[in-house]
Amino acid sequence: MNNIKIITEHWGKINPLKIEDYVSVGGYEALKEFIEKSDSEGALKEVKLSRLSGRGGAGFLTGVKWEMVSAQKGEKYFVCNLDESEPGTYKDRLIAENNPHLLLEGLVLSALTIGAKKSYIYLNGNYEKAKEVLARAILQAQERKFLGTKILSSKYSLEIEIFSGAGAYICGEETALLSSIEGNRGEPKMRPPYPTECGLFGKPTVVNNAETIASIPWIIQNGGKKYLKCATKLFVLGGSVKNMGVFEAPIATTIDEAITKLGGGMQDGKEFWFAQVGGASGGIYLEKELGGPILGSGAILVVDRTADIYDLLLSWTGFFRRESCGKCVPCREGTFRLHEIAERLVDGEIADRDKEALNDILWTLENTTFCPLGKFAATAVRNAIDKLGILK
Ligand SMILES: Cc1cc2nc3c(=O)[nH]c(=O)nc-3n(C[C@H](O)[C@H](O)[C@H](O)COP(=O)(O)O)c2cc1C
Ligand code: SF4
């Protein structure tokens, strides 16, 4: 496992409230280089070469998305997704709190590359500290002309606005997020058209996860080819491992390596049962399946044999029942019914007709909902039936 740190290198070593600390470790050098060369095509080329994939969960290639928007003329927007409402995930918050200028530098580089003059940071409404830190960083960057009108006396200008969400999980989904900034209900929209064609206020828009954006300064400075060889990802470890927290490691790290090398293995006296990978919407992995990659947002919950699976199911289904936006019937009703059955499981009152209904409900959530949240709600329950045999 290589030790290159692209995102977390300066965490705990520099004061996040002081721009001079970030500048003293080479901060904003990538932006200076970009401005000197005035080369957005070159920057786009490096991001494409890096094969940087989105860190928000879906893994879409960043360079491909940027190319679609940079090719279009006129007004456009760049949006940083810092909604991060997935239970067990808090890596983006730590990026903002520990090194806000890395995120800002990445955001300025990203927006200028695609030709946007206005950018939003869509911030989880509960992230009060991150909001303060980011607001201060924006002012400092403006004072030093890294942001605002005529950046570093060049032809480039960019305004960044922080938009605080109201804490809905669905507002992390990009079309719901954009609706929310427009002042509408946070509900997903039909795609196509994709935000890259018709996004915020009807203009071409790139939405990228905060971690994706924070990787950009390194790519611009070191080149896409080098990044391709040493790409990293933030992993969030929780549950029954010795070391819990956020770790930066090579993107190809397996679940097993994350648990043993980053997490230090199981806590003393605890026996591994399964890992849930990707937050509440993620799948369940048994010991024999741990050689695979870490999908989704990078969160790993390690569960030991003493855990009560019915309590976990109650909590997961309760989360999705609460967070279903209600736009489509299969999810609005399906998540509600799923939670009811989980309550009966906990109370030991599960009936045969519940078992039959469960199959129909899960199939409906997996196959007929308007957006991926329905599928997310079904994943852990389906896995608990198939892999943990909860109904036997
Ligand atoms: C229900 C749902 C919730 C999501 N929540 C988030 C989120 O909190 N943060 C995030 O970056 N992406 C989230 N996404 C993915 C976004 O829609 C989008 O793909 C992502 O922000 C694109 O950025 P990336 O390419 O850099 O990953 C969510 C998607 C769905 C379907
Ligand atoms: S699947 Fe759920 S969250 Fe998605 S649109 Fe339908 S009701 Fe809303």
Image: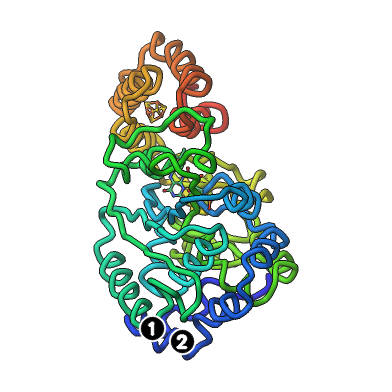
Dividing the picture into quadrants, the one containing residue 332 is top left
Dividing the picture into quadrants, the one containing residue 143 is bottom left
Between disc 2 and disc 1, whose residue precedes?
2
Q: Amino acid at mark 1?
A: Arg
Q: Secondary structure at mark 1?
A: loop
The reply to whether residue 265 is in sight is: yes
Mark 2 → mark 1, Cα distance in angstroms: 11 Å
Q: Nearer the viewer, residue 54 or 32?
A: 32
The crowd level at tag 2 (other Cα within 10 Å; few <14, some 14-19, many 20+) is: few
Q: Nearer the viewer, residue 276 or 70?
A: 70
Q: Please give the name of the residue rendered at 48% of the width and 67% of the height, measured from the top-left corner.
A: 108
Label 2 with label 1: CB-CB less than 8 Å: yes
Task: Please state the horizontal and vertical placement of residue 273, each as a whole percent of the image.
Answer: 52, 45
The reply to whether residue 314 is in sight is: no
The residue indicated by pointer 2 is 23
Q: Nearer the viewer, residue 152 or 272?
A: 152
- Horizontally, residue 93 falls left or right of residue 204, namely left
Task: Please state the horizontal and vertical placement of residue 231, each as a whole percent of the image.
Answer: 66, 65
- Horizontally, residue 312 falls left or right of residue 218, namely left
Q: Nearer the viewer, mark 2 or mark 1?
A: 1
Where ligand 2 lies, by image quadrant? top left
Q: Which quadrant holds the N terminus?
A: bottom right
Numbered label attached to residue 144: 1
